[in-house]
Image (tube, coloured by chain):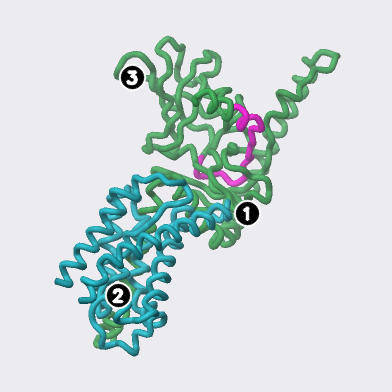
Amino acid sequence: MKQRAYILLTFVALFVQVFILNNLSISPIVIPMVYIIPIVMMPIESSQFKMLLAGLLLGVAMDIAMGTMGLNTITTLPIAFFRRPILNSLAGLSSISKEEGIPSIKRLGVRFHNYFIFMIVFHLLLFYFAEWLSFDNFGTLILRIVCSTVVSLLLDYIIVMLFMKRLSA
Amino acid sequence: MQKLILFIRKTGVAILFIILEIIAIRSYAYSTPYTQARLLVWSNMVVGGVHSTFAGITNYFALRKENIRLTEYIATLENRIRTLEASLPEEKIRVDGVLQKYEYLSAKIISSTTTRSRNFFTLDKGYSDGVYADMAVMTADGSAVGVVVDCSEHFAVAKSLLNVDFRISGVLEGDGSHGSLVWSGEDTQIIDFVEVSKYANVKQGDIVRAAGFSYYFPRETVIGTVEEVELANNGTSYNCKVRLAADMGRQYNVILVHNTSAGEARELEDSVKK
């Protein structure tokens, strides 16, 4: 049941990203990204190798879908690789090391929000910086990051909350 | 052996992560000329200083040859000035419109490639020295080398004529026929001069110069000399092989040229296109 919910969450996040958000031109400074959710919500006990593999698959899939030749993979790999240390420090994983299943409010308490927001913002920073590749027009870059982060976080929360009950069951 | 296996087990995922990330960055870097140039600028911020030192050493050994070449060129220029002065009428001519269209700046190439299909080179001057994107790069004796595509504070990256994405307009000296210059990626000394009208009087040994309407190079910039002429498959134009005037692999001192009116011309063109 949980597995099915996780697959559905992955499918919904990718569908929303590829078919809706990528075709939605709200403004050049607002480019929401939600496709990282499957990595953020990977079960806590997942090994680093599994995480890296998932990061690679997701990155390559998004690169194919967006025609970006490596841009998404550049950003998903560090997110996947550093997930464990981030979870350790931000969500106090050591105290719940025997915990299994996806990161959720039920399992991590309010620390879930620290972890969740950090992961999303970390990904967006990497993505926009790799895309912009320059500190020229620094103001525009910052504005783009801030606006996109706010919209992305809002959408990420909506998608995750819709599945939270089923995933934590 | 056991220690090695233990080490690989411990660090295997980290090594895999680094390898995958490098592959992704490489793939992204080569996806568009922009990302390639930007990443080159970034790497130059880190390794540019080292490149400068090595280029300095190489330049030192080439100084003698370079000096002789420059002295010869100064002599040619002196001669041209004398001839032009002699032919000038007494009254003053307003030449600012002609002469001040281009601004010149000297620079050194500190690293370059010629073996790839998209070749770039790095210059030791950046925007703090007055270098802009779109500046033409020429040899000291006026042959085309490339065009600046991006710059950081102290370094600039230029796209070489030996770059399959680079296309400029050329004109046949004497005949005045136009065509496009594009590198096929096969020979580092030969560039293709294509789409030349079949009514053009083109023959081996003709000089090809940058067309006057090219935004980058001044009108008289030499590209090279025609080496082979053949009728294109469709029979409506000539395709020529042009031997480049500049030896692309052996350039150290170059001149950067800024066309001060290019921006205005481009804006006007863009407004018409809209």
Q: Quadrant of residue B162?
A: top left
Q: Nearer the viewer, residue A53 or A125?
A: A125
Q: Residue at x 38, y 71 (%)?
A: A116
In the drawing, what numbered circle is on residue A163? none
Give whichever of A121, B117 is nearer the camera.
A121
Report the span colored magenta: B248-265
Which residue was labeled with disc 2?
B13
Q: Position of residue B249 (x, y in %)?
A: 50, 44
Amino acid of disc 2: Val
Badge 1 and badge 3 in a common chain: yes
Image quadrant containing the N terminus of chain A: bottom left
Q: Is residue B198 above or below residue B152?
A: above
Q: Is residue B142 above or below residue A98?
A: above
Q: Chain of mark 2?
A: B
Question: Residue B196: within the magenta?
Answer: no
Three-letter code for the amino acid on which mark 3 is drawn: Ala
- The tint of chain B in the picture is green
Write down the residue under mark 3.
Answer: B232
**Mark nearer the N terminus (2 vs 1):** 2
Chain the render paints cyan: A
Give the Cα separation between the discs numbered 2 and 1: 37 Å
Q: Tell me which chain the residue with mark 3 is part of.
A: B
| Residue B225 point in image, percent of width and height | 50, 25
Label 1 residue SS: loop
Quarter where residue A78 is shown: bottom left
Q: Which mark is residue B153?
A: 1
Q: Earlier in the sequence, mark 2 or mark 3?
A: 2
Disc 3 crowd rating (10 Å Cα; few below 14, some 14-19, many 20+) is some
Q: Left or right of B172: which side holds A15?
A: left
Say whether residue B61 is visible: no
